[in-house]
Image (cartoon, grey):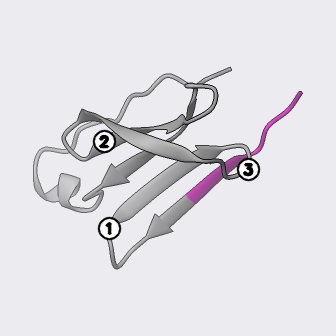
Amino acid sequence: MTKKMYIHYDKEGDYLEVRFGPPSESYYEEMEEDTFERIDEKTGKVVGYAFFNVQKRKEKQLKDIEVELPL
């Protein structure tokens, strides 16, 4: 089974979201400051990530964002 990856960036809100597969009932768990995992409520699996203050990271020390992909 293949899944699509959806990427959305809201420039005004400085918010980046990466989602795997179609939308589902989910909630977010904070991984670190401004970085969240999106967890499917039914399966408990990671179905995406959300990143806040993406542009502001450049103003601070530019830091890579590293997350594991659910395969």
Q: Amino acid at mark 2?
A: Thr
Q: List the single residue furthest toward the left.
A: 60
Q: Which residues are magenta?
A: 1-7
SS at circle 2 = strand
> Between disc 1 and disc 2, whose residue precedes?
1
- Residue type at mark 3? Pro
Gap between marks 2 and 3, in whole Å?
A: 21 Å
Q: In the image, which disc is placed on residue 50?
A: none
Residue pointed to by mark 1:
14
Q: Secondary structure at mark 1?
A: loop
Earlier-in-chain disc, 2 versus 3: 3
Q: Nearer the viewer, mark 1 or mark 2?
A: 2
Q: Residues within 10 Å of mark 3 (few under 14, many from 20)?
A: few
Q: Amino acid at mark 1?
A: Asp
Residue at 54% in and 62% down: 8
Note whether 41 is above or below 14 in the view shown. Answer: above
Q: Which is nearer the N-term, disc 1 or disc 3?
A: 1
SS type, badge 3: loop
Residue reaching furthest front? Answer: 42
Residue 14 horizontal side relative to residue 47, left or right: left
Q: Position of residue 17 (x, y in %)?
A: 48, 54
